[in-house]
């Protein structure tokens, strides 16, 4: 078992987080407090059309700021090509910051736009780790899904359509300066967005908890995120859409993002990438289908620390450590089912042997994520996991 001593810990948290019912209503006040009067505003198009509250936010900004240049993002999971096209809207504008209102796609797009505003050329030139030279414009991120955690992370994920891969612009400069959590933005979320975004956050928190690079500080965030996400996603599956439940999910997703960026991802997160790129499966659903299988594999090979998380969800169960760990995989699978998520790859259109090979052969591009798993997880384990999720049902 990993030694969780206090040696050699680096823990980063750079975003000022503001939380509360209606806190974005007077967003202009928060921007002015930072002397940001000229903003590039990126709003998710679907959200803009479905959520009247966003229109109120826009009115506040237009009435109280010197300049608002608006772009409506209509691309879930943006490509580099889309980033370059969106950048043209802001090319000649004199801006102080970018504001993103939307899900992970919109927040990531805004981070990319902030990079391109101060760095010449195309987005692809900055793909990878720490390729960005000039400090980007500040980003204010306001999630409308709960969620990717992009409002606190330094990652901006884009699809490279030429290489058929998802690989972002990742730089220490990308941390949003402000993140606002206002559950009113979630009022228009259908169950499938709660499910997808919520299980993305669940994947982040579970894989960060067991990651080899986890520290006892990152685990504080993983644990708390897990508790908030598990209990409140259950409530959502039962029809609860209360203010508290939505705010808890937003906070849980943010804490999961903080845990992830301070420890590491894992096999389920990595396997979600080929499923997303080749089969258009929304990112969160793509991760959650692998999660129970990866947990089972770890438990079968002697890893039992999931029992700590089981206790948070089901206190006083009276079960042994081993029993709790085994039951933990079942609990995650049941939650997925209750949220209406397929638990078999066939449910996502993965049919033929060639389909399976696409996932298996492409997943190793994220070798670093597999190396974070507490039990060695190589090509053989990837193949077994993918194939076992293709049988039955
Ligand atoms: N940067 C990071 O740290 C990070 C972490 C995880 C995932 N991601 C990326 O985030 C993306 C996924 O983001 P997401 O899951 O938040 O979804 P999304 O931003 O792709 O949005 C999905 C759909 O939900 C709709 N939508 C969003 N908010 C809504 C609301 N409140 N009401 C009604 N409809 C709404 C959108 O219109 C869109 O059709 C992926 O590209 C993934 O790779 C980034
Ligand atoms: Fe994710």
Image (spheres, grey):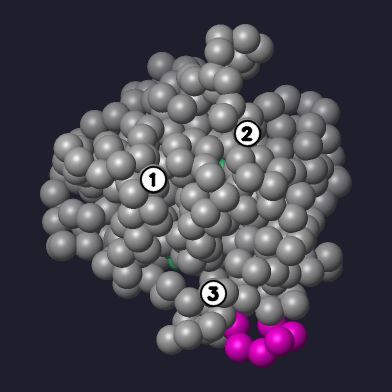
Judge whether 205 appears above or below 12 on screen. below
Q: Please determine whether, in this image, residue 35 is positioned above or below residue 373.
A: above
Q: Which residue is mark 1?
A: 322
Q: What SS does tag 2 mark?
A: loop
Q: Nearer the viewer, mark 2 or mark 1?
A: 1
Residue at x-position 65% and y-position 69%: 384
Residue pictured at 31% horizontal, 64% vertical: 334
**Label 1 crowd (10 A; few <14 / some 14-19 / many >=20):** some
Residue 213 located left or right of residue 322: right
Report, in whole angstroms, how far the alpha carbon at label 3 lies from the one at label 2: 25 Å
Q: Residue at x 42, y 28 (%)?
A: 221
Q: Residues within 10 Å of mark 3 (few under 14, many from 20)?
A: some
Residue 223 spot, x, y in % from top left: 38, 33
Q: Nearer the viewer, residue 90 or 319?
A: 319
What residue is pinned by disc 3? 389
- The spot of residue 369 in percent (x, y) is 68, 46
The residues colored magenta run 350-355
Q: Disc 1 on helix, strand or loop?
A: helix
Q: Nearer the viewer, residue 55 or 194?
A: 194
């Amino acid at each position: 078992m990993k030694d969780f001593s206090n040696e050699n810990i680096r823990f980063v948290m750079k975003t000022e987080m503001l939380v509360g019912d209606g806190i974005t209503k007077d967003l202009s006040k928060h921007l002015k407090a930072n002397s940001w009067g000229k903003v590039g505003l990126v709003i998710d198009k679907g959200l803009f059309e479905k959520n009247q509250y966003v229109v109120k936010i826009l009115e506040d900004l237009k009435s109280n700021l010197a300049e608002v240049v608006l772009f409506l993002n209509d691309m879930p999971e943006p490509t580099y090509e889309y980033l370059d096209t969106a950048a043209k809207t802001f090319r000649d504008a004199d801006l102080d910051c970018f504001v993103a209102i939307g899900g992970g796609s919109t927040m990531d797009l805004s981070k990319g736009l902030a990079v391109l505003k101060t760095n010449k050329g195309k987005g692809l030139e900055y793909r990878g780790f720490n390729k960005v030279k000039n400090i980007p414009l500040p980003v204010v991120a306001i999630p409308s899904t709960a969620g990717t955690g992009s409002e606190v992370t330094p990652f901006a994920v884009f699809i490279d359509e030429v290489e058929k891969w998802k690989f972002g612009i990742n730089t220490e400069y990308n941390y949003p300066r402000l993140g606002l959590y206002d559950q009113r933005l979630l009022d228009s979320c259908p169950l499938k967005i709660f499910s997808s975004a919520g299980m993305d956050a669940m994947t982040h928190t579970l894989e960060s908890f067991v990651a080899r690079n986890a520290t006892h500080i990152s685990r504080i965030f993983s644990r708390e995120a897990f508790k908030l996400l598990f209990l409140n996603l259950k409530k959502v599956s039962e029809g609860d859409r209360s203010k508290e439940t939505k705010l808890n999910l937003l906070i849980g997703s943010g804490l999961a993002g903080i845990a992830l960026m301070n420890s590491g991802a894992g096999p389920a997160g990595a396997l979600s990438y080929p499923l997303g790129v080749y089969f258009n499966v929304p990112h969160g659903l793509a991760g959650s289908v692998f999660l129970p299988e990866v947990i089972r594999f770890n438990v079968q090979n002697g890893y039992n620390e999931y029992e700590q998380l089981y206790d948070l969800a089901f206190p006083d169960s009276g079960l042994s450590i081993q029993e709790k760990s085994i039951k933990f995989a079942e609990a995650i699978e049941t939650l997925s089912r209750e949220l209406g998520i397929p638990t078999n790859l066939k449910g996502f259109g993965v049919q033929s042997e060639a389909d399976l090979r696409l996932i298996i052969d492409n997943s190793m591009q994220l070798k670093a994520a597999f190396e974070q798993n507490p039990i060695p997880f190589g090509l053989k384990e990837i193949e077994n996991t993918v194939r076992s999720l293709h049988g039955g049902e």
